[in-house]
Image (cartoon, rainbow, N blue to C red):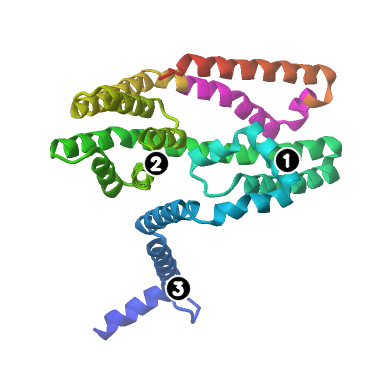
Amino acid sequence: MSEFFDSLLTWLQPSGSDFPGLVPVAIFLCILFLLEGLYLFLKNSNSKSDRRVKARLKFVDGLESGQSTQSLIKSELLAQDSWKKEWLGKINRLFNLDELLLQADVPWKSSKVIMVSALLGAGAGAYGFVQFGILGALGGFFSVGYLLPNIVLRMKKKFRLKKFEKQLPEALGLMARSLKAGHSFPSAMQLVADEMSNPIGLEFFKTFKEYNYGMDFSDVMMNLYKRNHLKDLKFFITAILIQRETGGNLVEILDKIAHLIRERFKLLNQVKALSAEGRLSGIILCVMPIGIGLALFKLNPQYISLLWTHPTGKLMIGIALFFQILGMVTIKKIVTIKA
């Protein structure tokens, strides 16, 4: 037995060294377990359920604070900085920032977003001016101060609305089953808020709380549509408002709308599958010139450098970029099917 342990220690220990080979493995495992424990701790402390509860409590606090005496002194405070209010209001109306922040579910105020974007754009513009002059300053301010925040907000809005749209048929089915069981329509909305995850759970929670705080039902439903600008949700809200005016079988209406949304998703997925070859061809055709150019630059830089050193080469690059962009837009139009 002792010979076995001696041979095992000899295998673990590198030849000609007193430092066992097992020690690096042990250090690696300790660091790995430490990182995993840190990840699990952060995940549990900021879990989805905690974020869900915090978002709902924050919305309820906002409703309660909106009915307090704070609104009586709001106009006086804003009157002290009326020029700031007017300036920020013009920027907000120009870019429709309030609606974008609402649909992206960003808790920041529009004034805060404008100020942060302006500061980031000023920093990027100063760096661009030092490096490239006035054109660099304009490009840095425009790209970092306007394009980057706009792209981030629109991507967040698109991701959130897409997730909401996928959850909508299930929510309508749940409401229909709740109505069949004898619950009222507000109770069915509360059931969706309790049972389903965000974003649709939070949105129906907001709608239910607004209705409970005494808002008109049509205003509540229109607020839901403003926060989630979707065609399917518009069908649902229009059908509900018409049903409240004229009457009808609400359960059947919800079932039909849910079925219609599912069939539309099915059709879009079929179209996406059929157009996969065209979309892949478009990606390859768009990436291939860039890849070939980089490969030629790596293999023979002097040969391809004529494209940006010679006047004819510059003209060729301009024409190639124009037709490249034109081809990308054309392929995008062909393979994109509007819902």
Of circles 1 and 3, the one toward us is 1
Choose between 197 and 31: the one closer to the eye. Answer: 197
Q: Which mark is residue 142?
A: none
Q: Quadrant of residue 318?
A: top right
Q: Mark 3 highlights which residue?
A: 27
Residue stretch in magenta: 280-307
SS assignment at label 3: helix
Dot 3 amino acid type: Ile
Q: Quadrant of the N terminus?
A: bottom left
Query: As displayed, is residue 135 above or below residue 11?
Result: above
Dot 1 amino acid type: Trp
> In the figure, is residue 77 to the left or right of 249?
right
Choose between 254 and 160: the one closer to the eye. Answer: 254
Q: Mark 2 highlights which residue?
A: 215
Residue 126 location (% of width, % of height): 81, 46
> Which residue occupies the extreme bottom position in the image?
2
Q: Residue, x 40% and y 61% (percent of image)?
A: 43
Cα distance in 3D space between marks 3 and 2: 61 Å
Of the image marks 3 and 2, the number of the one nearer the N terminus: 3
Q: Mark 1 highlights which residue?
A: 87
